[in-house]
């Protein structure tokens, strides 16, 4: 059972992320109005904000400034939402539903969807590079580098390329892990590290959080694969069963449901173990681990 204090904390942080995104996005009436309206349509009022939640929790642990953490959370969510907009387009996964409403290319058109993704990606780095955002300029530069690496061909975009190339192929569990360490895990890992960079953790502390983040990134994808195979469209807010329909390799297709659930439990244990040195300071991160698992179990 989820602790009520954590549930309350999560609701506050989700509202905080929504408010920060509302302020960071261009106003709908500002020209080019259709583009800005579409950016707000797809970014606001939906999603669980897992990446901002991880960033906020890591920033709390590291003693980061709230305003810095807000900008970090917005940058992460802009990258995440841009990837969803592009992934849903006909040239990729060709999906019509996201977060319980029509995808951007359906609600608007393909050209607008492409530009929405481009603009959100650029906005992420606009927000993160604002002068004076971090107390230490070296930490700000490191945050920019971390997000760029996590988003590009050696991170999320590269993982999507591997995913597209794997459709209809038999791949090994090791190959699947490499794909998801890039496609999903890289940005989740970046969320934890960027949150921590808002504060003053030393290198040993950052390394510990990186071990946690790596486990969490894979855990999130394993649970996502389980949900795609077991939950309905109304529950997911996106089309259920599309991985199987597209003949995509998943943890469920390679391992089966029982073993996939066992892997999720093992990754959650690894994540908790990586936080052992932080004691009570890491309680929110531990609770987020259990929240990610409980989406399915």
Image (tube, rainbow, N blue to C red):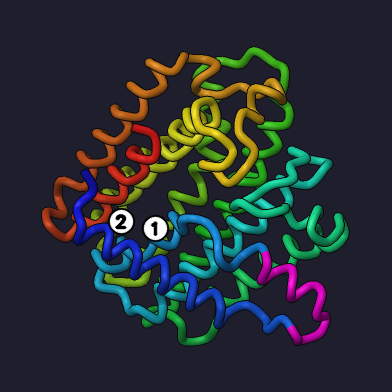
Labelled disc at residue 55: none
Count the labels in the image. 2
Q: Residue at x 52, y 15 (%)?
A: 254
Labelled disc at residue 193: 1
Which sits in the foreground, 268 or 27?
Answer: 27
Q: Residue at x 55, y 66 (%)?
A: 45
Is residue 40 shown in magenta? yes
Reading the image, the residue beneath label 2 is 206
Which sits in the foreground, 197 or 228?
Answer: 228
* Residue 167 image position (x, y, % from top left): 71, 23
Q: Circle 1: is it few (<14), some (14-19), or many (20+) Cα within 10 Å?
A: many
**Quadrant the C terminus occupies:** top left
> Label 2, label 1: how many angstroms apart (C-alpha)?
7 Å
Residue that protrudes farthest toward the front in the picture = 234
Q: Is residue 198 above or below residue 279?
A: below
Query: Which label's residue is closer to the chain start, 2 or 1?
Result: 1
The answer to whether one can see residue 196 in this image is no
Q: Is residue 61 above or below residue 65?
A: above
Residue that protrudes farthest toward the left in the picture = 279
Is residue 93 shown in magenta? no
Q: Is residue 296 above or below residue 146?
A: above
Q: Residue at x 61, y 70 (%)?
A: 125
Q: Magenta stretch? A: 29-41
Secondary element at image label 2? helix
* Residue 141 image position (x, y, % from top left): 50, 70
Q: Residue at x 44, y 78 (%)?
A: 137
Q: Circle 2: is it few (<14), some (14-19), or many (20+) Cα within 10 Å?
A: some
* Residue 166 image position (x, y, % from top left): 69, 24
Q: Quadrant of residue 53?
A: bottom left
In screen coordinates, is 92 left or right of 251?
Answer: right
* Residue 275 image position (x, y, % from top left): 21, 47
In screen coordinates, is 83 left or right of 264?
Answer: right
């Amino acid at each position: 059972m989820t602790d009520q204090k954590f549930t309350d904390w999560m609701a506050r942080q989700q509202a905080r992320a929504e408010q920060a995104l509302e302020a960071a996005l261009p106003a709908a009436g500002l020209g080019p109005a259709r583009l800005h309206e579409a950016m707000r349509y797809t970014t606001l009022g939906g999603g669980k904000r897992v990446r901002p939640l991880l960033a906020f929790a890591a920033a709390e642990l590291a003693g980061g400034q709230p305003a810095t953490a807000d900008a970090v959370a917005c940058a992460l969510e802009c990258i995440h939402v841009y990837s969803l907009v592009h992934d849903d387009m006909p040239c990729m996964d060709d999906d019509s539903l996201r977060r319980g409403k029509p995808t951007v290319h359906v609600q608007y058109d393909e050209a607008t969807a492409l530009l929405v993704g481009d603009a959100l990606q650029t906005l992420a780095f606009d927000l993160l590079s604002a002068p004076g955002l971090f107390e230490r300029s070296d930490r700000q530069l490191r945050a920019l580098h971390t997000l760029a690496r996590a988003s590009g061909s050696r991170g999320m975009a590269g993982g999507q390329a591997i995913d597209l190339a794997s459709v209809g192929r038999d791949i090994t569990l090791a190959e699947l892990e490499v794909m998801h360490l890039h496609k999903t895990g890289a940005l989740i890992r970046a969320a934890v590290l960027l949150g921590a960079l808002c504060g003053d953790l030393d290198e040993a502390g950052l390394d510990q959080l990186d071990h946690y983040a790596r486990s969490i990134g894979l855990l999130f994808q394993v649970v996502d694969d389980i949900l795609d195979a077991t939950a309905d469209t109304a529950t997911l807010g996106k089309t259920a069963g599309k991985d199987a329909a597209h003949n995509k390799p998943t943890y469920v297709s390679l391992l089966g449901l029982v073993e996939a659930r066992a892997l999720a439990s093992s990754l959650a244990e690894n994540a908790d173990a990586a936080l052992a040195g932080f004691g009570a300071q890491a309680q929110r991160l531990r609770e987020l681990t259990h929240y990610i698992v409980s989406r399915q179990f």
